[in-house]
Image: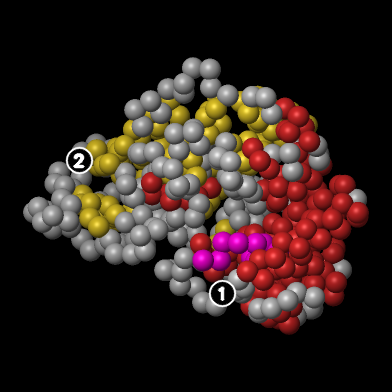
Amino acid sequence: MALAACGGQSTPELPAVDLNRDLLTTSLDVDLSAQEVSARIDFAPASSRNLSLRIGDLEILGVSDGQQALDYRVEDADGDLRTPARRLDIATGAGTEVVIRYRYHAHTQFDGWSQAGYTFLWPYYCENLFPCKPSPADGLRFDLLLRNVPTGLTAIYPEHLAGDAPSYQLAWTVADYRWLDLGTTPSGTLIRAAYLNGQELAAIAGTKYLRDEFSWYERTLGPYPWGTQAASVEVDWGPDAYGGMEHHPYWHVPAQDYADPTTHAHEAAHGWFGDGVRIACWEDFVLSEGTASYLAAAAIGAVEGAAREASVWTGYRDQLAAQTRRADHPARPSGCNPDFDVLTIYDVIPYYRGALFFASVEHSIGRQRLLAALRDFAAARQGRAATTQELLDLIRTTTGHDPAAEAQHYLYGLGAID
């Protein structure tokens, strides 16, 4: 085995960099006490002999095909410093499996594993936790095992993600948790909440309607793609955190927002859009967040009533107006550039311009016809990457209404929203 960094050590002749091989499954066996992992990565056969993966600041301890050592090279890669800066090239021969042993390190900027006990990988930071391809279009299945959980604490994580998931969907959190059972949906999905010790009242308030809203999603959008159990999990992201993260089936919500039912409804909707249907490129961020924001408002209306839904829409409009006064940009930027930085549009515009786009289409064709189109899209694209334009095309073909004018105004345009 040979290892070289940029400093000029001799290396074996390895094939050229190839970040295009299709990853099928990543299985992680994690020792929490040592911060060491054995990752088994299965990939599709291809003509290329090389497998290249982003590895952030991971410390590689060894690479094999499961039986014998493989040559590999760790080197710097050009690119934005906000993205992981290293790449692992492995000479894989004809095999379809590599085993990589490595050590991961603590991060403090929501870009990997935190010593507070949680992981945060969105958007590009999977490579600070496991060797990966961070493109949102790439989907793969996951197995996860956490060993040596500290005594007295609970580890919450999916042992298996059976469907193709974006790389940022996988997560774990370890803390002093309590469970609140919210009931089983008519489709048989057990809905729970995991809250931090002392936060029971916030958990009760925030998840009061979650089971019924989740049931509405299943009736409206089809079967839940991520198993027979789902939970909203409280995490301590620090005093300035807000929102949530779509780590289905155990999505994360920070302590500051755990008592807010709208946040829970929004994150639950990502089981179908954002995770179930992943985005084809970062410019399609609105397809995840705008759709989830619209669905959350509709679910709240169905469960809590029209007045409560109206208050959600008022909140969307108020936050959008405040943001566009500060800085405006399209909800869906043009193109599909692999170097596009989604953090340049990471504000409320994709969320609430996107939601208002759907509200405008709903005004034209009715809620039930629009929801039927979204159900068709979720069924057709589940486990696949999709574009905003594909959704627009499906709305046009299934409803007879061309949403191009609404898309131009809400998704691609600038300025005030009427």
At horizontal 58% and vertical 24% (from top left) the residue drawn is 176
Look at the image and say whether residue 75 sits in the magenta stretch. no
Residue 129 versus residue 379 in the image, above or below: above
At horizontal 66% and vertical 78% (from top left) the residue drawn is 414
Q: Amino acid at mark 2?
A: Ala
Q: Quadrant of the C terminus?
A: bottom right
Residue 57 versus residue 49 in the image, above or below: above
Query: What residue range appears in magenta?
Result: 344-352
- The image position of residue 24, as x and y in percent, is 43, 50
Tell which residue pokes out farthest to the top in this image.
Answer: 151
Q: Circle 1 sits on which residue?
A: 333
Q: Give the structural element (helix, strand or loop) at label 1.
A: loop
**In the depicted view, which residue is nearer to us: 220 or 254?**
254
At horizontal 36% and vertical 47% (from top left) the residue drawn is 131
Dot 2, how many residues are within 10 Å of its Cα: few (below 14), some (14-19), or many (20+)?
A: some
Q: Circle 2 sits on which residue?
A: 69
Q: Which corner quadrant of the image does residue 259 belong to?
A: top right
- Residue 178 appears in the rendering: yes
Q: Amino acid at mark 1?
A: Pro
- The image position of residue 211, as x and y in percent, is 78, 39
- The image position of residue 196, as x and y in percent, is 63, 28
At horizontal 55% and vertical 40% (from top left) the residue drawn is 237
